[in-house]
Image: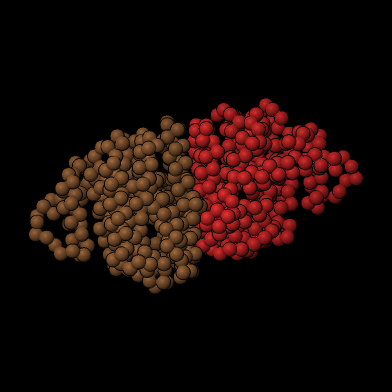
Chain colours: A brown, B red
């Protein structure tokens, strides 16, 4: 795995990353590039591990019925930031687990995330043709196949956790309990439900927005960190801290999503831009404006970092990742 | 719980049940009614327990978001035979568990079964307006809500198993591993996928049909018995026998489904009748004709009963239920 990086390097990385989003003027300091390479190496190493894990822990595309398994792989192999599995792996390492032992859990969380995107893109939901820069699953296959593909990815997440951690049934049980609660009707799916309702209600409130973002987005990010902690043997106190980190990081992530939808183009995003304004959707940008939304995101980022740094161990990568997520361009 | 019934009574029950389907002429023997009452009492007792369990183990309809939880309850409270949870409870009792300890697992399997129906009824799948005698979930609510409701019921099954059996993590793990494998892309969902493909292929073969029925229907019935066995502490040998029973019972159930689709009316079925012939779907009836299909069903029924009776303990109710399923009218 890539070496860890210093706090000073992180600052540079962040600065470079901000440059790359074209929101600040480039500096001539070459250390930016050194910093960027270090972080990029780490990101690339995690990415590589995650892609290998996805390939290893999903059924082969030739498994009967082949169309089903081809579609599962199409949906999940479309790329993406892999933020959730990356947070999971880095947190597991922070608590002393190696990447291999955490990999099935990382694949499981990416399966749940991807299923939610596949269903969210369906015509009866967001009706989107583009995801991760290519045709959504229902456009590449058909609606029925995409529906079943989402179902299959969700189910596979639980099957994988149960199988891969079978030698440690108590750990398997904890991982499944955490993931099932978060993916359920009171968190991930509940957030999606309220998101749909809010689209039809131009008077949605700050409270509605907070419910949606805490449950649709932040809960899965919280759980990514907690699952990593559980694999690494984190105790309840540590898991509570990881939840706090995840909640703040998740809110930041969603606010930035809202800002990018309003400011970035479709090609950069890899998904359709400007959708929120087109339907007058209640977002952080609509409620607060871009500048204020950015301030709120920065506050959540700082809170996430403060909580992270209260943990013992080397949190440098997680801090850098948190900052990078804040400054991301897509 | 209702008392068990004798083999002789079972024969009467079956005879009465056949009468009730109007396929055979009624007999004047009053013992039919006695037999019917006994079995009916047992069925009613299980039904009552299952309905209580569903009410207890699903989130209240007022839980935020209320629309989500109302739809979950609408979908699952629509009635139905409750075959899968009933098999689970009866099998758990056969192995010495009480109904209360098996109830969360019974609710979990009904959640998975109901989710599969909700998604199967969607316009992009079977596009059906009627289920269990009333409007399908997407007709009563809307497509997006039905999609999320199915997702939520599936996820709830795993959350419930993890929570209700948290004091026995090894049992929770076994139950989840069994259910997740069966509900996944190589069984339940895989069977649905091939079923969809077969609808577009009027040359589907006996092998295709067997894959669909073994995975779309029989696997969940197998797993109902196995989950009951696991709650009751059944060992691997017993679980293997339960699988054999479930496979034969599941195939019988599906063949009867095909026959009823061809012979019964929509009101009796509580779902749209005659759909298979309308689209020239490959079914047991199309491949073999009604008489031969009935013979095949009878053979599977006998094999299921033979395997059941190889188990120690009082299998009378399960035998009667197996026979009743063969003779059912809807």
Residue nearest the viewer, comparing B327 with B226: B226
Q: Is residue B73 above or below residue A290?
A: above
Residue nearest the viewer, comparing A206 with A8: A206
Where residue B146 appears, x then y in whole percent?
Answer: 55, 59
Q: Is residue A305 above or below residue A262?
A: above
Q: Is residue B52 visible?
A: yes
Q: Is residue A97 above or below residue B61?
A: above
Where residue A329 appears, x then y in whole percent?
Answer: 26, 61
Q: Could you tell whether A233 is left or right of B218 in the image? A: left
Numbered marks: total: 0
Q: Name the residue located 42 percent from the left edge and 31 percent from the top edge.
A: A167
Q: Name the residue located 53 percent from the left edge and 61 percent from the top edge.
A: B145
Q: Is residue B117 visible?
A: no
When asked about the image quadrant of residue A27, the answer is: bottom left
Q: Name the residue located 15 percent from the left edge and 48 percent from the top edge.
A: A8
Q: Could you tell whether A289 is left or right of B158 in the image? A: left
Q: Could you tell whether A198 is left or right of B213 in the image? A: left
Q: Quadrant of the N terminus of chain B?
A: top right
Q: Name the residue located 54 percent from the left edge and 50 percent from the top edge.
A: B153
Residue nearest the viewer, comparing B13 with B61: B61
Where residue B8 appears, x then y in whole percent?
Answer: 81, 34
When asked about the image quadrant of residue A178, the answer is: top left
Residue nearest the viewer, comparing A203 with B222: A203
Where residue A135 appears, x then y in whole percent?
Answer: 37, 63
């Amino acid at each position: 795995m890539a070496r860890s990086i210093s706090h000073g390097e992180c600052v540079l990385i962040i600065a470079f990353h901000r440059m790359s989003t074209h929101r600040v003027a480039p500096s001539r300091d070459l250390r930016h590039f050194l910093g960027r390479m270090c972080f990029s190496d780490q990101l690339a190493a995690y990415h590589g591990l995650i892609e290998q894990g996805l390939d290893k822990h999903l059924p082969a595309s030739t498994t009967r019925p082949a169309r089903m398994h081809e579609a599962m792989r199409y949906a999940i192999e479309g790329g993406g930031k892999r933020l959730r599995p990356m947070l999971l792996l880095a947190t597991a390492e922070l608590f002393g687990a190696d990447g291999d032992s955490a990999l099935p859990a990382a694949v499981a969380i990416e399966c749940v995330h991807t299923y939610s995107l596949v269903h969210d893109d369906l015509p009866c939901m967001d009706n989107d043709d583009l995801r991760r820069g290519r045709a959504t699953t229902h456009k590449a296959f058909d609606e029925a196949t995409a529906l079943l593909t989402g179902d299959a990815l969700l189910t596979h997440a639980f099957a994988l956790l149960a199988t891969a951690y079978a030698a440690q049934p108590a750990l398997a049980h904890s991982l499944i309990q955490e993931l099932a609660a978060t993916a359920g009707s009171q968190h991930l799916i509940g957030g999606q439900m309220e998101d749909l309702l809010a689209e039809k209600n131009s008077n949605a409130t700050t409270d509605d927005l907070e419910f949606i973002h805490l449950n649709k987005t932040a809960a899965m990010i919280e759980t990514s960190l907690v699952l990593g902690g559980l694999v690494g043997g984190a105790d309840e106190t540590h898991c509570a801290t990881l939840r706090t980190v995840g909640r703040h990081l998740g809110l930041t992530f969603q606010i930035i999503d809202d800002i990018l939808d309003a400011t970035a183009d479709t090609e950069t995003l890899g998904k359709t831009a400007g959708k929120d304004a087109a339907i007058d959707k209640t977002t952080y940008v609509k409620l607060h404006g871009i500048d204020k939304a950015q301030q709120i995101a920065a506050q959540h980022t700082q809170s996430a970092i403060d909580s992270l740094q209260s943990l013992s161990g080397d949190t440098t990568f997680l801090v850098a990742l948190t900052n990078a997520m804040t400054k991301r361009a897509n």
